[in-house]
């Protein structure tokens, strides 16, 4: 049994899969690299020692001590990385399990509220309708959060299903903009869509790209202090399709910009404008675009608005 455990520990590829890490991020692979460095350091120390020290036993002792010190240091460092990797794996599994367990009861609660609010069970008073509305809104927020957590969990465990196909970004973007039109008007925002003609098709997962576009537009509309404009642009750029959403909203402080694609991060000025939100949308968007072979980025200035963009490879 102990021999089997040792073999499992020596299986670098297996350990990397266990932690769901790239090879160069895997603790076991890093330990092998450190071992090679220690061997090279020992050889260099030996040749230098033989040149300046006449007693071979002293040279051997020096090389041995250097190798032992480096081995202990590397072991402690790699063990720390391994603990972090294991903690991250357990955290991802915990989020996945909890999200799956919460999804069913929250969905049942949502449909129960819909049924009660429809009046089919009994007559609903006007005051009761207000409470049902509040409950439905909060349950919807819980459903969105659980959905985002499940997607994040699948991204981290490399199990997010992808169904790539050819589709028109123009048709997709135009439909989404039309869906957001009423929402934009409610916020007193002018939502515009511009697109070059006869754009080529892209090859990606349309449902995932739709989620990215909706995230960009939704953020641009929500984080607006007053009447403003959101411009959605689609055009061809080199061998890619370029999509951007430009707004005249609150913008992102320079100090916060380096964290904008991190999980659960929300800028302080955004928290003042809009308390709702999980801070997962942009992390999910970046993961989807990277997986699709595209690029994603933004530019922003506090108080003057933001421009979020991504590219997708054109289907040749």
Image (tube, rainbow, N blue to C red):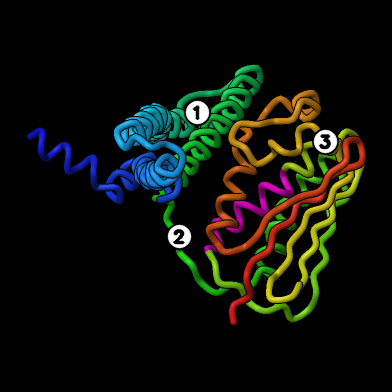
Residue 255, position in %: x, y?
79, 32
- The image's mark for residue 113 is 1
Quadrant containing the N terminus is top left
Q: CA distance from mark 1 to mark 2?
A: 33 Å
Q: Does residue 157 show up?
A: no
- Residue drawn 88% across and 36% down? 302
Is tag 3's residue or tag 2's residue first in the polypeptide sequence?
2
Is tag 1's residue or tag 3's residue first in the polypeptide sequence?
1
| Residue furthest left in the image | 1
Q: Which residue is mark 2?
A: 162
The image shows residue 257, relative to residue 233, as above or below, that is: above
Is residue 207 shown in magenta?
A: yes
Q: Are marks 1 and 3 in contact (CB under 8 Å)?
A: no
Residue 277, position in %: x, y?
65, 31
Residue range in magenta is 205-218
Q: Residues within 10 Å of mark 1 (few under 14, many from 20)?
A: some
Q: Quadrant of residue 281?
A: top right
Is tag 1's residue or tag 2's residue first in the polypeptide sequence?
1
Q: Are marks 3 and 2 in contact (CB under 8 Å)?
A: no
Q: CA distance from mark 3 to mark 2?
A: 34 Å
Q: Which residue is mark 3?
A: 254
């Amino acid at each position: 049994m102990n021999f089997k455990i040792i073999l499992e520990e020596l299986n670098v590829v297996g350990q990397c899969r266990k932690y769901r890490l790239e090879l160069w991020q895997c603790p076991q692979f890093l330990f092998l690299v450190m071992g090679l460095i220690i061997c090279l350091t020992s050889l260099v120390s030996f040749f230098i020692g033989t040149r300046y020290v006449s007693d071979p036993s002293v040279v051997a002792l020096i090389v041995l001590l250097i190798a032992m010190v480096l081995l202990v240091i590397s072991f402690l460092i790699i063990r720390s990385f391994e603990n972090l990797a294991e903690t991250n794996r357990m955290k991802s599994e915990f989020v996945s399990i909890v999200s799956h367990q919460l999804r069913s009861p929250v969905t049942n609660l949502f449909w129960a509220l819909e049924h009660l609010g429809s009046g089919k069970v009994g007559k609903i008073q006007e005051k009761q309708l207000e409470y049902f509305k509040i409950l439905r809104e909060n349950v919807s927020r819980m459903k969105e959060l659980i959905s985002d957590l499940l997607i994040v969990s699948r991204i981290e465990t490399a199990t997010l299903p992808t169904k790539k196909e050819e589709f028109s970004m123009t048709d997709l973007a135009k439909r989404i903009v039309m869906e957001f039109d009423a929402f934009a008007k409610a916020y007193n925002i002018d939502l515009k869509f511009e697109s070059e003609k006869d754009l080529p098709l892209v090859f990606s997962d349309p449902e995932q790209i739709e989620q990215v576009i909706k995230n960009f537009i939704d953020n641009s509309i929500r984080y607006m202090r007053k009447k403003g404009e959101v411009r959605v642009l689609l055009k061809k750029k080199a061998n890619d399709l370029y999509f951007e959403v430009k707004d005249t909203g609150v913008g992102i402080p320079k100090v916060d910009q380096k964290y904008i694609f991190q999980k659960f991060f929300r800028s302080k000025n955004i928290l003042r404008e809009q308390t709702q939100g999980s801070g997962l949308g942009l992390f999910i968007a970046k993961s989807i675009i990277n997986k699709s072979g595209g690029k994603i980025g933004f530019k922003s200035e506090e108080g003057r608005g933001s421009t979020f963009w991504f590219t997708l490879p054109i289907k040749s």
